[in-house]
Image (cartoon, helix red, strand yellow):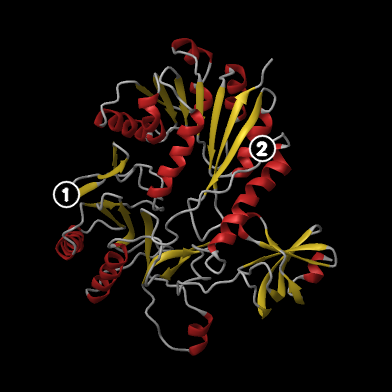
């Protein structure tokens, strides 16, 4: 049946709800149909693109009736670049479905008793909320169907975002509503300068071309970092590009460049050259100051990061006598944020450079009760480590999307810390880990936080306490 259904058009289907990963759900003859870029309440015709025994996926090709919950997308690139897939849904409904996503994942996966999921903490800013964006140069701009059908010649160089699932196609971005400050001006002026001066854009197939990648970081203190990646080592041309940026945008706090001759844009193993200014920008949170370098991780929504960390600190409920373990500490932001309310904080992180940032930020803020260790969590957090340090009273864990390794979960069960505060960007893997921790822990509070408006992503914080024996 599934193969026969491919490319079949199903007419007048009513979109029922939003499911995981932002897809919407409808039904056809009892089978679930997932559809993207529609809203609950839409009545649509759907062309089936994939058929499985238990579900189908499709694309809306005609909308007969628009949902009352729809709003007009504010970005001209909506539906193409893939960055803000929920622009067409009002923000209150976005928040409701994100909260529901947390509830669904815990009901389906965790299968442990949980209290009511708290109302989600929404973002005050639903546009221009990101402090970091990566743009890619390409000589192979994505062309719309209308452009192709016109038969005209179009400029093929582009500076923007990858088309979803296409590494070699770039959407040329005119205006991005994700990052404020001088971000749009820097990108557009650099592209204009390159086109006017015949500076080559990168060819991702042939791996040639000077201009490869542009990274822009901003901070709540008003500082800006600009990093240009070059795909070829041409000193005179590199100097010309960097001189242009320095002269055109004197307000740039940190102007850096990288000569990256590898086959990918990752640069954590590359030398970074400071062309002008400092090699970091400063972020502040309460009385704390954080130095954010080109290789540093910092939550990309500064304002909501503060809200998230306040939730974690509140749930930890420290009185100054506790030893806190901060697992997957990254650059130590949470560890340093809670340090003044703890006896000692011990942070562990896989990336050694991040641990160096954590130590530096502790020093900058005169925190002398923090210890940081680099290494694989499942290898470091063992009996020998615990024997060499005080046992934790509180564990804060903020793992990557994949969640915690089974060995780490087993060690947490062995440690029996009275309290675990689990921060996650993926409620599904969080729920899986909570199910395992349910052997000894009970869920006391569930607090979702919206870090990424206009997307289906949601951050979630769970407080677990040790069950009484």
In which quarter of the view is residue 36 placed?
bottom right
Helix, strand or loop under label 1: strand
Q: Where is mark 2, residue-wise?
A: 115
Q: Nearer the viewer, residue 232 or 343?
A: 343
Q: Nearer the viewer, residue 85 or 344?
A: 344
- Where is 205 relative to 444, above or below? below
Badge 1 density bin: few <14, some 14–19, many ≥20, Cα 10 Å? some
Residue 277: give its label.
Answer: 1
Q: In the figure, is residue 400 to the left or right of 272?
A: right
Which residue appears at 43% of the width and 88% of the height? 152
Q: In the figure, is residue 105 to the left or right of 356?
A: right
Q: N-terminal of the two: label 2 or label 1?
A: 2
Residue 466 can be seen in this image: yes
Helix, strand or loop under label 2: loop
Residue found farthest to the top: 387
- Where is 298 relative to 420, above or below? below
The reply to whether callout 2 and callout 1 are in contact (CB within 8 Å) is no
Q: Position of residue 232 (x, y in %)?
A: 28, 58
Q: Nearer the viewer, residue 238 or 64?
A: 64
Residue 356: give its label.
Answer: none
Q: CA distance from mark 2 to mark 1?
A: 50 Å
Q: Position of residue 89 (x, y in %)?
A: 57, 66
Q: How many marks?
A: 2
Q: In the figure, is residue 288 to the left or right of 88?
A: left
- Where is 107 relative to 415, above or below? below
Q: In the figure, is residue 302 to the left or right of 185?
A: right
Residue 10 can be seen in this image: no
The quarter of the image holding the C terminus is top right
Q: Position of residue 30 (x, y in %)?
A: 84, 63
In which quarter of the view is residue 154 placed?
bottom left
């Amino acid at each position: 049946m599934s193969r026969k259904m491919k490319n079949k058009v199903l007419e007048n289907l009513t979109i029922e709800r939003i499911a995981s990963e932002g897809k919407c759900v409808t039904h056809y003859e009892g089978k679930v149909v997932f559809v993207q870029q529609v809203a609950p309440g839409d009545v649509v015709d759907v062309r089936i693109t994939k058929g499985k025994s238990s579900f189908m996926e499709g694309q809306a090709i005609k909308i007969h009736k628009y949902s009352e919950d729809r709003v007009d997308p504010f970005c001209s690139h909506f539906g193409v670049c893939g960055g803000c897939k929920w622009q067409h849904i009002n923000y209150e409904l976005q928040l409701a479905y994100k909260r529901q996503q947390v509830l669904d994942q815990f009901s389906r996966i965790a299968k442990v008793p949980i209290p009511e999921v708290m109302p989600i903490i929404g973002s005050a800013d639903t546009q221009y909320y990101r402090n970091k964006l990566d743009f890619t140069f390409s000589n192979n701009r994505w062309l719309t169907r209308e452009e192709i059908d016109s038969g005209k010649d179009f400029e093929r160089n582009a500076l923007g975002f990858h088309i979803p699932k296409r590494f070699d196609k770039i959407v040329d971005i005119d205006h991005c509503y994700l990052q404020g400050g001088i971000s749009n001006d820097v990108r557009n002026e650099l592209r204009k300068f390159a086109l006017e001066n015949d500076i080559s854009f990168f060819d991702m197939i042939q791996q040639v071309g000077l201009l490869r990648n542009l990274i822009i970081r901003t901070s709540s203190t008003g500082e800006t970092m600009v990093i240009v990646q070059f795909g070829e080592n041409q000193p005179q041309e590199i100097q010309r590009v960097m001189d242009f940026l320095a002269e055109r945008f004197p307000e740039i706090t940190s102007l850096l460049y990288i000569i990256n001759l590898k086959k990918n844009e990752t640069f954590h193993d590359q030398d970074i050259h400071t062309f002008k200014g400092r090699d970091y920008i400063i972020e502040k949170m309460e009385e704390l100051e954080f130095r954010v370098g080109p290789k540093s991780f910092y939550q990309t929504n500064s304002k909501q990061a503060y809200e998230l960390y306040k939730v974690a600190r509140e749930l930890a409920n420290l009185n100054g006598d506790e030893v806190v373990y901060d697992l997957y500490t990254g650059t130590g932001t949470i560890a340093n944020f809670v340090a003044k309310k703890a006896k000692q904080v011990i942070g562990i992180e896989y990336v050694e450079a991040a641990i160096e940032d954590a130590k530096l930020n502790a020093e900058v803020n005169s925190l002398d009760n923090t210890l940081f260790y680099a290494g694989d969590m499942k290898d470091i957090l063992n009996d020998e480590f615990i024997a060499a340090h005080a046992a934790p009273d509180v564990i804060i864990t903020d793992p990557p999307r994949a969640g915690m390794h089974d060995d780490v979960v087993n060690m947490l069960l062995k440690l029996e810390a009275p309290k675990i505060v689990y921060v996650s960007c993926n409620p599904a893997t969080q729920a899986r880990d909570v199910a395992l921790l349910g052997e000894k822990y009970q869920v006391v509070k569930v607090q979702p936080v919206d870090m990424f408006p206009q997307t289906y992503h949601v951050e979630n914080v769970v407080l677990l306490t040790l069950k009484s024996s």
